[in-house]
Structure formats: C-alpha cells, structure tokens
Amino acid sequence: MPRSRPSVASTFAFVLALVFSLLAAAPAAQASNTRTVYFGSAPCPSGSATCPSSTGWPYPYPYGTGGGYTGSGQPIAGQNSFSPVTTGGSTATDIVISNASPSTLTQIQLNGGTAAPPTINATSVPFMPSPPTPADPAFFDANGNAILKSLPTGLYYQPVVYVVSNPSAIPVNCSFTASSSAGNDGLHCSIGNLAAQQSLTLRIIVTDVSAGQGTTEPWFELGLKEGASGTGSNSDTFFTYSELTVAPATCAVQSTFALDNAKVDLGNEGLGCLGTAQGGQTTHITTPVGFGNGTIAQVGNSDQPTLCNGTGFTCFGQASYASVDGGANITGGLQWTIEWAAAVVPSGGPKGAIHFLQTGGYEYVYFKPKYLCDTTITKLCYVSLTKDSFGNYIAVLKSPQNYYIKGF
C-alpha cells in the first residue's frame, strides 16, 4: 500500500540510471552489432518487493526488461507489462525506448498490430528469454517470418499514445489504422532520432472490445533507419512482448484503464452482485475529473469479516473496495454508490458508514445532517441515503481517498 508517490522527474531519473547501468552490464554482442537499445517496460527497482523472481511472469505493471544481445550476438526481446484488466476494459503498457549506443539512432519507428512487419532480417529474429518465460511461443521463425499476431484478435488500440517522459523533447508522432469498423488494430509511431544516452517513455492503451478472457502475447517492434531489411548482419529491428491476461469481471473486482480525458465511471451492478448468494451488495465509483496520462481504476466488494474489529462499530455486509490513481487523493472527491440488499441490512436500516484508509486508520459518518457533504471534500461525507421499493438501501458517499468502506 503506497504511502507517498515520488515525483515523475525523480522516478524517471532513477529508472534512466538503472536502464543504462543494466545495459552496461549486459553481455558483449558480436562486433557487427553496433546498436544497443533498451526496448521494454522499465526495470524493477533494486530490492523492490513488488517485482517477481527470475522465474516469474508477468512483471507487474509498469515493470519489465529491455532486451539486449546474447553472447553470440542475437538480439534478446524486451518484456513489457500491462495494467490489470477485466473483460471489456482497457489496459495500459509503459514502454521505455533508450539509446545506449555510442552514436545517434536515426528515424526510429515503433509499430504494433497490422503496422508491425510481417518479415524481418533473419539476423534480427529475437531470442526469447528463458527464464523468465520458458513457455512463451516465439513470434518470428528462424527465417524472419511472423508466426504470431502482434495484436491478438479481439484487442484494439485506443487512439492515443501518452508521452509519459521525454526529457530531451524528442519528436513523437503516432497514428492508427483500422482494418475493420471494430477498432484500431494498427499502431505506428515516428519518433525521430535518439542521441546517445537519450530516452523516452510511451504509454499505449489496449481495449478488449470482444469482452473475451484469457492470456495472449501482444508484441511491438522498434525499427531504425534501415527498417526491417532482408540483408545485412547488424540488427536493425528490436522487439518487446508481454503476456496479457484479461481476467473475468467479478463482484470482487473490475479493472480498467481510464483515459486522461475520461472520468472514472466503474461499477459491478450488472453482475448479479445484489443477490445474497453473491454478497448482497453492489459498488459503483465515479470521479469528477480525469487524470493526466490516464489512470488505473478498480472496484468491487468482498467479505473482509475482521475489518471493523477494534473500531467500536458493528459492521454488516461486505466491504466496498476502490482503487483509483494508485491510491492518491482524488481532487473533488471519489464518489461511492453502495447498494445493500434488504436481506443484509440490520433491523432499522444502516446507521452510517466507516471508511478504512489506505494510509492506515479510519473515518466514519452517521447518516445524519451533520455528516452531509459540503462543496469541498476533505474527509468522508455522504450525499444521500435512500430506500427503494424492494427494501434495498442505496448510500451515496464521497471521500478524497480510496480503499474500503463498510456500513454499520
């Protein structure tokens, strides 16, 4: 549970230093390989408990690896990670592009989906790391022919790429193409030139419009000035890939990535969660504003039977859960709409709600005028409490923070 968030500048400075230190420590490539590129999600911070062991996959968003070369000079595919997503939602991946070569890399292009090359120079066929991914299928054969789609069926690109970090102001121009009316299945970004030691980070958003489930392996290609040529011994194209799992949406969790111009609006009402067999409760969250470069949003409800222990309150029902913007305070307040089925509400109806803070401790409100929301949201407050014709209660609350709420 995060307690504070470092600034974008300090985080990027740390990641950039770590990227180049990792590249410097990589095995020496063949003399013919004069281009060294980090292409993948940022490396895990040293000693971070959120990152997997050497045999773990997937890397938790936003971490991964940047590739390199084997001892024989074969390029190693980088690895990127996607944010959590459930059926019908969107997911983000952050991809770092860094030049650790001694000279400038020119006319760099990032491609995905139908814009990715169907054939490449056989000397650029990527090695698939093992570990950490011994079971992942290759996406090019030994002759340089693509054997795995860059963007799997049912997935499409949102028509936006965020430039998350670009300290050298490298020009970035991205465009999208669609082979059908279903959505954008081609991505092309012209990035221009990267001088030695320069780096930038792009955030790409993928949407599951098929509402499918399961694990696929999307990949992206990074081409240099020479493009995906069929001759020559110097690698001119690089790759990053990931396992992307679209999990089923459940009463316990729904996950998506909200774009920067979109307010978070997410709930589990359509999953039968109000039925007592599913917990007898629904949770819906909204925000008054969007978030720069978008944000991960999650909502759900679960039992959490000991959460109210030691508070002096006798709670009922499940705990409503929300996570938006990594747990940071929400400008204007996060709005919670919680519906409790009549069967789970104690006699006389709910008296109030208790909010457990991600930073520790809790706050509470009684459903009395004293606790009604004002124009400025500085702590938990409530907007309304109503009862429908079925005896279900609907509470609308606001809070500047995320995490858990239970009724009492």
Image (cartoon, rainbow, N blue to C red):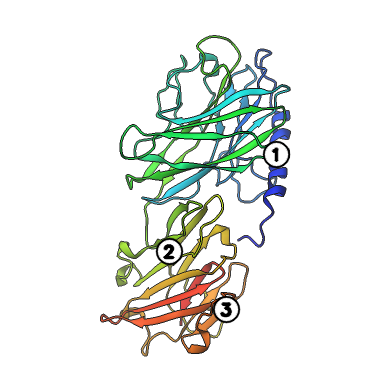
Residue contact at pointers 1 and 3, CB within 8 angstroms: no
* Residue 40, quarter of the rendered image: top right
Q: Say the numbered circle drawn on residue 363.
A: 3
| Mark sitting earlier along the chain (1/3) | 1
Identity of the residue drawn at 58% across and 26% down: 108
* Residue 232, quarter of the rendered image: top right
Which residue lies under the disc numbered 2? 300
Q: Say the numbered circle drawn on residue 308.
A: none
Mark 1 and mark 3: span between their CA atoms? Answer: 40 Å
Q: Which amino acid, by three-letter code, is at mark 3?
A: Glu
Mark 1 and mark 2: span between their CA atoms? Answer: 36 Å
**Direction from residue 34 to residue 333 in the image, left or right:** left
Which residue lies under the disc numbered 1? 16
Q: Which amino acid, by three-letter code, is at mark 1?
A: Leu
Residue contact at pointers 1 and 2, CB within 8 angstroms: no
| Mark sitting earlier along the chain (2/3) | 2
Q: Secondary structure at mark 3?
A: strand
**Up-down relation of residue 92 to residue 1 (above or below):** above
Query: Residue farthest to the left?
Result: 389
Q: Secondary structure at mark 1?
A: helix
Q: How busy is the neighbourhood of tag 1: few (under 14 within 10 Å), some, or many (20 plus)? A: many
Disc nearest the viewer among 1 and 2: 1
**Direction from residue 321 to residue 361 in the image, left or right:** right
